[in-house]
Image (cartoon, rainbow, N blue to C red):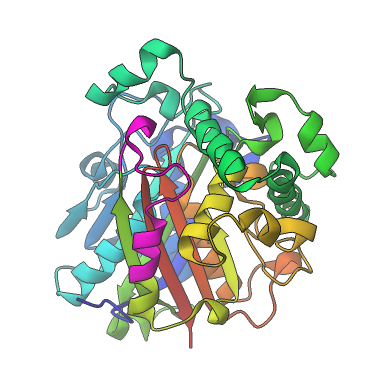
Amino acid sequence: MSIKRAAAIVGVGDVELEKGKVKHGHSVLQIQAIAAKRALEDAGLSKDDVDGIFVAGLWGLPGIGSFPSVVVSEYLGIQPKYTDSTQIGGSAFEAHVGHAAAAIQSGLCEVALILYGSTQRSEKSRTLAGRPPVLTAQYETPYGLPSPAGAYAMAAHRHMHQYGTRPEQLAEIAVATRKWAQLNPHATMRDHLTIEDVLTSPMICDPLHLLDCCLVTDGAGAIVLVSAERAKDCRKKPVWVLGQGESHSHWSIQAMPDLTVTSAAVSGKRAFEMAGVTHDEIDVVQIYDSFTITVLLTLESLGFCKSGEGGDFVSNQRTAPGGDFPLNTNGGGLSYAHPGMYGIFLLIEAVRQLREEAGERQVKNSKISLVAGTGGTLSSTSVVILGRD
């Protein structure tokens, strides 16, 4: 089934951070409510219009979006006709876009609200380090594999061994992303950054340095999707869901079929086929950057370059402002924010780019954007292709 143009994003909202923390000591539920209110106002709608709610929740992990949709709905005073608490890590929100569009197309709801919030920085917690135990952890935890950095370091080492990828090529990604952050007044990290700075920053898990790793911040975001009919009455011009795909290949890194290929090879192919567009038609790209290696592997798996060519693809600041491949234009998880699960913020930035609301970082004439979320330890992926009229 295709959901092409079955639904449109008409509202987005988030919350401001101060040194990576939410202001005023707000709780997870409070910042989710603030983001939801802003997204609905952006769309020209109210909470009474919402009849579908989508929240990625984790029970028992303090501060990390730890409430599923039934709890969030109660707090917001919403009694939805359709609800979804699918949790596949940081790619859950791209999956929610597909699920919401399908529900709207089927008539199960008309106005869908996708939400996420985390106060992990304020509560000094970390998502995957505190994730619920699973059976396959017995093959990793006893041997001291740090999570999640150790798993991503394994993938980086394998790529370097197999293809000759160099640390400075990974550093190119961090530097380019920081340049975008310097154009975003809401980014957490905006200081000047060089490749040498990345390579001399503390080693976290060989070969990944501190500046190869995402931030640990608070944050909350919300997205409103509506039917084509409902979009006609909304405040902002619609951003259409053109294609979406999702997949996961493993949870524990020891079960990953190929450390150099993610399931974006599956989810991306599905999204491109549904949207009916080619790689050359994508104007701006938002890719989950939990680590620099995540970006490189995702670019290859999506088919923007061949396996092993990712290092050369990102070299010479190709993905930075002024380059011919605009990537992670708000500063990404590496420099903007990373509140445990980052996928919803990729979508928010894509919408703002397509609406031409991105200020200094605006990519001119952007009509089509690809968003690729990653969850777990390179475990799950969901790809969404968005377009404006």
Q: Is residue 8 above or below residue 127?
A: below
Q: Is residue 266 left or right of residue 315?
A: left
Q: Is residue 359 left or right of residue 87?
A: right
Closer to the camera in the image, 60 or 300: 300
Q: Is residue 249 above or below residue 286?
A: above
Residue 44 seen in the figure: no
- x and y percent of residue 211 in the render? 70, 35
- x and y percent of residue 258 in the render? 40, 44
Residue 315 seen in the figure: yes
Closer to the camera in the image, 29 or 298: 298
Q: Is residue 283 left or right of residue 225?
A: right
Figure quadrant of the N terminus: bottom left
Residue 222 falls within the magenta-colored stretch: no
Residue 264 falls within the magenta-colored stretch: yes
Closer to the camera in the image, 29 or 309: 309
| Picture quadrant of residue 10 | bottom left
At 69% from the left and 41% from the top, the residue drawn is 188
Closer to the camera in the image, 29 or 380: 380
At 36% from the left and 74% from the top, the residue drawn is 243
Q: Is residue 234 left or right of residue 18?
A: left
| Picture quadrant of residue 304 | bottom right
| Start-end of magenta stretch | 250-270
Q: Is residue 373 above or below residue 120?
A: below
Q: Residue furthest top?
A: 142
At 51% from the left and 38% from the top, the residue drawn is 155
| Picture quadrant of residue 352 | bottom right
